[in-house]
Amino acid sequence: MEQRILRLREKLTEQGIEALLVSHPMNRRYLSGFTGSAGVVLVTASEQILITDFRYVIQVQEQAPHMTLVQHQGAIYQTVGDQCRKLGITTLAFEQEHLTFAEFLQLKEAAGQIKLLPTSGVVKELRMVKDAAELAVMKEAARIADEAFSKILGEIKPGVRENEIAFKLEFTMREMGATSSSFDMIVASGKRSALPHGVASDKVLEHGDLVTLDFGAYFQGYASDITRTVMLGKPSEKQKEIYDIVLEAGKRTIEALRPGMTGKEADAIARDYISAHGYGEYFGHSTGHGLGMEVHELPMLSSRGETVLAPNMVVTVEPGIYLPELGGVRIEDDVVITETGCEVLTHSNKELIVID
């Protein structure tokens, strides 16, 4: 944790920021290790302060011994203002995406003569590059998702409802140590598989359906995110065609991923391949996204992804084709960028699984 604070201080110095108020829960946890639901972190060139209420005093002492604990009695932003004045701070930066307007007004009133400076992405940019401890946890989160999928594969059959599959998959991941699923699980069958975010419904699986499962294990504060599409019965020529195109698009992207490449360049590999086979208009989302404490983080593998990929960034690779009258296919893996290329963290079978 202290190394993260040091990296943040370097970034603040580069940007000429005197002090930063961190209010986003995940950013707060990233810097402090504190898992409670209330509090803010104040970081200056020499101080790291966690401000919270009496409910979390013992928890902060146990989880964040490197932080100076300040307990607020009244409004939290009044305590923030008081601490800034105590430290002689004249300018306070804050995370503009993570304060409501009402909270900003409270902070402004409490700050008095202290100048407030809106910032964006300061801590989130640090979170893009994972340390060894983070990568170890993420590998375990991926393993849990992989093994859970293998264990429930026999439950995917005609006559079962989508939400039954989702329940069994989440229950299995929790049995294996996950805190929860990483997000509202997607189980989409038949024509519903053409919905990229088709959250599990009460639809009954039928013979002839493509079934897309998009799920992940949330483990020790980190998410995995995997998608597999299976087939109930013999696939039609069209179903097999789009599956093979998506599979190859993902393979080509993973083979090409390396440090120094931009997210835009990575996205183009999958997008160009799918477009060359006539399905470009049916691939409407990005090829991938960053993964970590949240299921969607920086960097983005998209047509607007200008971030240069670097070692120890973790991204998803998830091309898809979605045909409204037929259904859809998406195949997704979690991948860590290495010094020379990348390493795939998810290992579930990607060849088309046909369930008779």
Image (cartoon, rainbow, N blue to C red):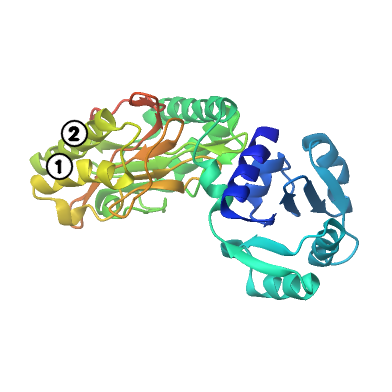
Question: Where does residue 179 sit, x and y in percent of width and height?
Answer: 62, 37
Residue at numbered disc 2: 248
User: Residue sitting at 21 percent across and 42 percent down?
Assistant: 270
Question: Where does residue 289 sit, x and y in percent of width and height?
Answer: 39, 45
Q: Which mark is residue 60?
A: none
- Quarter in which the C terminus is drawn: top left
Mark 1 touches mark 2? (CB < 8 Å): yes
Q: Nearer the viewer, residue 290 or 259?
A: 259
Q: Which mark is residue 273?
A: 1
Question: Where does residue 32 sit, x and y in percent of width and height?
Answer: 72, 41
Query: Where 198 sits versus 85, above or below?
Result: above
Tell me the SS state at disc 1: helix
**CA–CA distance between discs 1 and 2?**
8 Å
Q: Nearer the viewer, mark 1 or mark 2?
A: 1
- Quarter in which the N terminus is drawn: top right
Q: Is residue 13 left or right of residue 172?
A: right
Query: Where 22 sits versus 287, above or below?
Result: below
Total labels drawn: 2
Query: Where 189 sits versus 227, above or below?
Result: below
